[in-house]
Amino acid sequence: MNDQNRMDEDLGETERDRFDAGVANAARDSYRAPPETPRDEMWTVIQAARAAAAPGVVPIRRFRPQPWWAAVAAALVVGVVLGRGSFGGGPDAGVGLSDAGTGTPAVVGVAPPKGTPSAAGTVVPRSYRVAAARHLNRTADFLTMFRVDARSDRLDATDLGTWARRLLTDTRLLIDSPAGDDPELRNLLGDLELVLAQIVQLRADDPNEVEIIDEGLESSQLLFRLKAAEATAPAMVGL
Amino acid sequence: MDDSQLLAKVRAGDPEAERALYDAHVDRVFRLAYRMTGDEALAQDFTQEAFIRAFNKLHTFRGDSALSTWLHTVTTSVVLNGLRKVKKFRTSEIDLEQARAVAGGRRRAEPDLKDRLTQAIDGLPDGYRTVFVMHDIEGYTHEEIAGALGVATGTSKAQLSRARAKLRVELADFAEEVVA
């Protein structure tokens, strides 16, 4: 006679029911008691993922050069041109990016909208803020889809690498631009650079790397920070 | 607002209706995901993916069942499928926990019911554990469980019966405490 039969014999039906109910009650209270549901946090991610997958947004796996790349590139170029063209500072010139002693102009870009200096007091020219906002938006979409695909084993390392490489290039450009003088933005871009570099080097035959990147995204709360930055994008670009 | 009105608004792209649908069901999905994973980040990921999938599949809902039943079937399936993917990690995690419990348990005069209960539930075969957590802890019906797992309701009932029987044996030392 096994333990289970012996136990069932020892306990009558009523006792068994009481025992089962007692176990269920105790389990409800103590077995991995769930914390409060993080409704808003999850809703933000759900909305972002759905927006990224909406018609008109190109799925990551089927990479083709898209006009938005041109837009980001154009914005960066415009930023650089405006920045370099406004040395001397006419009446519209922005203020605040000082780089004394390096030969780099202390004043770059057009005048920013009022009330948009960074926490550290630096004022990033509007053109760079526009470029940064678009870049953050696209990178958030990319990383969201990366996570969804990683969790459904649908990753295409080749396409991912192509996208990540382009995003990495723009991230680097932004870090080295006046946008990188905003400490918060620089910090965010630095974390993005690290993750994108990992994705660029991702090999299709090593699923562990995907998990490591995924864990890195989780621990740095990068997507959440990107979403937060996106939420402030209109103010960020003065819209 | 009843299900059909809510559904019509969601299908029309009304963001407030989408949020209302989400708010009405997210707790139950998140709770199950957390009970099954024991990990908040993982539970969040599964819940998010479940709702993304559910919203994307909403056009396939034909009204054969209640919207809430359909939604829970979709979301629970996503959570349970996600769990299968991390099973490898969970197995090693449970092994470690059990090894620690065995090593430490013998030194303790009276391991408490909570610890033993957790070990006993974790030690159930996956199928038993899933049904036990869904039915006895989270209050899913056998019909809901069967729909989510893609099995017959009889299978769900049988799995639950076996799970309870195993727990009775595992927790026999705590019988007085359990029924008190």
Image (spheres, rainbow, N blue to C red):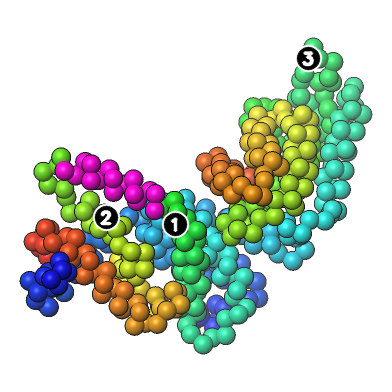
Q: Tell which subunit mark 3 falls on.
A: A
- At horizontal 92% and vertical 29% (from top left) the residue drawn is A85
Q: Disc 3 designates what residue? A: A100
**Left/right of residue B48 with respect to residue B109 in the rendered view:** right
- Graded by Cα atoms within 10 Å as few (under 14), some (14 to 19) or many (20 or more), the crowding at tag 2 reads some
From where the camera sits, is residue A166 visible? Answer: yes
- The amino acid on which the numbered mark 1 sits, given as a three-letter code, is Lys
- Same chain, marks 1 and 3? no
Check if mark 2 and mark 3 are on a common chain. no
Q: CA–CA distance between discs 1 and 2?
A: 18 Å
User: Which residues are drawn in magenta?
Assistant: B91-106
Q: Is residue A187 above or below residue A66?
A: above
SS of the residue under disc 2: helix
Q: Position of residue A125 (x, y in %)?
A: 79, 33
**Any mark on residue B118, and which?**
2
Tell me whether the residue at label 1 lies in contact with that at label 2, contact meaning CB atoms closer than 8 angstroms: no
Q: Secondary structure at mark 3?
A: loop
The answer to if B179 sits in the magenta stretch is no
Q: Amino acid at mark 3?
A: Ala
- Quarter of image, res A164: top right
Q: Which mark is residue B87?
A: 1
Viewer-side residue, B100 vs A219? B100
Quadrant into which the C terminus of chain B falls: bottom left
